[in-house]
Image (cartoon, rainbow, N blue to C red):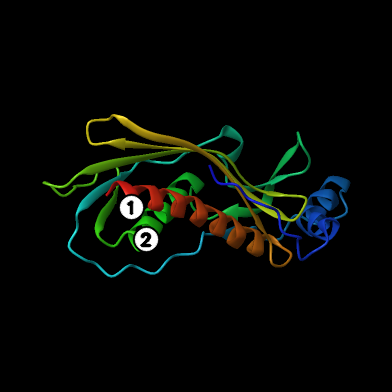
Amino acid sequence: MITTFRSKPTLLPGLIFSLLLGPLLLGLSGCAGSDAAPASYLLPSTTPAKQYPQTLAISVAPVGIAGHLDSEGIVMQLNDIEVYQARQHLWAEDIGEQLQQRLTQRLTLSLPRSQVVGKGQPMLGGVPVRDVRIRVSRFQGHNDGMALAEGQWQLLDGSGRLLKQVGFRVEQPLTEDGYPALVRALATAWDRVADQLAAELDRQG
């Protein structure tokens, strides 16, 4: 399990809180117009890895996500029990699909001697097979100036036998205010989850 020690945020939590939630409060009060077009975001892409002779085939299943994340709006956690789905800051594509795609890219980058594909795509024959399954329970901003990725991953062999199951919780501080910085921080947190998986796959390969 990833253990994360919080570094001191570079921004005051109250500032981040007000910048991210200010439009919500204005909208509720009826003082702000609703004509502005929503902003849409994609997780940043990664650079393809150099390919080598492949000795392991890895299948990445679609990422399961908690119900409160299954929407277009980027999620902010307001306190220990309240969450808010943004209406003007949206995921440009389904977040579960983005997480699967980025995980596949990151594993490909970290494991150049492995074939990494989405589940259901053709795989190499004659090499060991690993099946990656992830369930995400938290993928959201927090009012303390952190981005949070939390959930559980499983690693199975080609016959479906469970090899390892690990819970994860990664917190990544925002480097500046606003939703673009939150999206980048969430991407970094997700990469750290992928790197933990890659280390385990490398040990097994």
Q: Is residue 162 placed above or below 3 in the rendered structure?
A: above
Disc 1 residue crowd, few under 14, some 14–19, many 20+, Cα 10 Å: some
Give the percent coordinates (x, y) of residue 194: 45, 52
Does residue 39 appear anywhere in the picture?
A: no
Q: Residue lying farthest left?
A: 126
- Amino acid bearing label 2: Ser
Residue in the image at 39% along x and 41% along y: 62
Kindly check if marks 2 and 1 are in contact, taking CB atoms under 8 A apart as contact.
Answer: yes
Label of residue 110 in the image: 2
Indicate left or right for 81 with 112 as reference: right
Counting residues from the start of the chain, the first of labels 2 and 1 encountered is: 2
Label of residue 202 in the image: 1
Indicate left or right for 22 with 2 as reference: right
Disc 2 residue crowd, few under 14, some 14–19, many 20+, Cα 10 Å: some
Figure quadrant of residue 132: top left
Label of residue 151 in the image: none
Indicate left or right for 14 with 1 as reference: right
How far apart in space, not on screen, are marks 2 and 1 (Cα)? 9 Å
Residue in the image at 59% along x and 62% along y: 184
Indicate left or right for 194 with 11 as reference: left
Give the percent coordinates (x, y) of residue 158: 23, 36
Mark 2 vs mark 1, foreground winner is: 1
- Amino acid bearing label 1: Asp
Give the percent coordinates (x, y) of residue 195: 45, 55
Does residue 99 appear anywhere in the picture?
A: yes
